[in-house]
Amino acid sequence: MGGKAERDLWVIIGALMLTLLLAALDQTIVSTALPTIVSEFGGLNHLSWVVTAYLLAATVSAPLWGKLGDQYGRKGLFQAAIVIFLIGSALCGLAQNLQQLIFFRALQGLGGGGLIVLAMAIVGDVVAPRDRGRYQGLFGGVFAFASVVGPLIGGLFVDQLSWRWVFYVNLPIGAAALLVVAATLPGRPQRTRHVIDYLGAATLSAAVTCVVLITTWGGTEYAWNAPEILGLGIISIALLVLFVLIERQAAEPLLPLRLFRINIFSVSAGLGFIVGFAMMGSLVYLPLFLQVVHGVSATTSGLYLLPLMVGLLGMSIGSGQLISRTGHYRVFPILGMGLTTIAMLLLQSVDERTSLTLCGLYFFVLGTGLGMVMQVLVIAVQNVVDYPDLGVATSSVTFFRSIGGSFGVSVFGSVFASRLAGNITGALRGQDLPPGFDPNLIQGDPHYLTSLPPMAAARIIHAYSESVTAIFLYAVPITLLGFALALLLRQIPLRSTIGAAAGDLGDGYGRPRGESSQAEIERALSRLIRRDSTAVSLYTDLAHRAGYAFSAGTTWTLCRVAREGSVDRAVLAERAGVTVEQGLPYVQPLVDDGLVEHAASQLVITGTGLQAAQRLIRVRRAALARHLDGWDPDANPELTDLLTRLATETVGCDYDAPRAGG
């Protein structure tokens, strides 16, 4: 690849990574700012919706963005997603009350879902197959980085500037990415027709929203038997039934119901829901515990959350690597859900007297447990579904984790709000309080504690502590259910593609991608191609398997000349990084065998040479096909075409010239 072309590519990749970082950060950056936001707006019992609105909108819109990108081209849609995300970010920063902020967060999430899906897909449009594995790894690292630093950056903005900068920071970065994308990203001429399941997406969104409203309002705004809650329950059931009927008839359903007949898919979907439930619920309320109960700053609360994120990231990477080496995945979710349950029991025991060091250790245990599960679910599901369902099954597993996160935040919020009201009432009973004191102000603004007498403040802090830690006790039955589900997960030998390509952080941390089965296979094969040994051994082995006694350099030269038809000797030598004289020993065997001819300064492929190059491609294609254990290319024409294309690209100019030993 030439210097300018490589620089242009890195500019595009940099812009994609920036936009991906913005969307990924907005899942976690708000957590440490929530107590301050509530202090300004009040409405502590609605706090969870600031996170839930973003998660729901991003989750449900993701598959739609993916299919629209296939159908209409990704560049224009990606630009539209950036604009929607930036408008949502600006409006969030300008919000004047909690209701406005929640609505604008949903708008921001709508754009965020598109950023994540389309950025990952655009890599396949602009990067050669051999290099996609590297860039996919970088994108997975962006998700991991955002998960680790999100709470810390959010705390820094709150302490040093304002909580509004949690959203304003997106504007200059996103605007720069938008300009770069507009100027450098090429349009993609290919289009794939889809029948998009708009009705299914709308129905599922409405059903999930109703259930989240029930868990948010039940026991706080309304009694559990109130007409409002019962009505929402009836509506949610009706919408879910309608969704099932729609999915049965949809040409390309958002969530194919036939997948639930596969045991491993059903178990993995349930585990994904529980992992999202525990992770997002914890990330929202642990900063509140640290800031109110222990009195630390927003920045410091982000620092104390680092052990959780380090455990999550470390075990996600470690489990993926171990699965690649051993081929065994079942043990990880069992141990992970066991550790997560233990962590919930430990966290429900902490209070204002517990040292922050011990709290950090408990956070690490929680992160380690969650990390052992997140990476495994996609691997297990990809390993058992048929090729036509590969894309939607992969997206569905991460979809359930995202929906679980939405439910976790809302359920934890409902438990916290209901416990806090009663605990504060009990804490203030018999206390000498200032004239005109309103206990509701404490729930709307935790910083109001500084105006109270020390004894009353201490009792209220303890009430906050008991209210936050109660959510972890309520989470124990959920994580125990996850442990029981993990025991039902069966161990099945991994397909070559999945086993060898396990461990991509993008699978563990990403939102639903909405990609096709072909895109999923191409992602896995790209990682495998990237793991091929040096170009020297690749081309030497390729020639040997095809029945030629060529060196790696001679084989590369044949492929290069065959790909271009004719090429100037000096240009070819420059691409190989040698002089014309140094390259002559690699060219001469091809001339002697009649595969290449000299024509003045040009090297021209002959008919025999073209046949030899095509034979090399067939050998390469067969080698790639061996990675698709369990999927029959002959039964899936698009898979056959994919193998032929990847073989042609990776045998031709997409590989650098062999150097040493070639």
Image (cartoon, grey):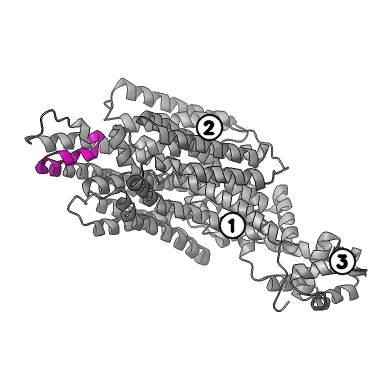
Q: Amino acid at mark 3?
A: Gly
Q: Amino acid at mark 1?
A: Tyr
Residue displayed at 73% across by 70% down: 539
Out of 657 and 52, give the one closest to the viewer.
Answer: 657
Give SS at disc 3.
helix
Whole-angstrom CA distance, mark 3 to mark 2, is 53 Å
Whole-angstrom CA distance, mark 1 to mark 2, is 30 Å
Percent coordinates x, y for residue 471 in the rendering:
27, 43
Q: Look at the picture and state if 620 lies above or below 55.
A: below
Question: Which part of the image, by quadrant, shows the N terminus?
Answer: bottom right
Give SS at disc 2.
helix
Marks 1, 2: nearer the viewer: 1
The stretch in magenta equals 443-460
Out of 266 and 81, give the one closest to the viewer.
Answer: 81
Label number found at residue 135 = 1
Q: Look at the picture and state if 228 lies above or below 496.
A: above
Residue 516 appears in the picture as rendered: no
Are the residues tagged 1 and 3 within 8 Å (C-beta)?
no
Percent coordinates x, y for residue 658 in the rendering:
72, 72
Out of 631 and 36, give the one closest to the viewer.
Answer: 36
Q: Which residue is mark 2?
A: 201
Q: Amino acid at mark 2?
A: Ala
Q: Which residue is mark 3?
A: 609
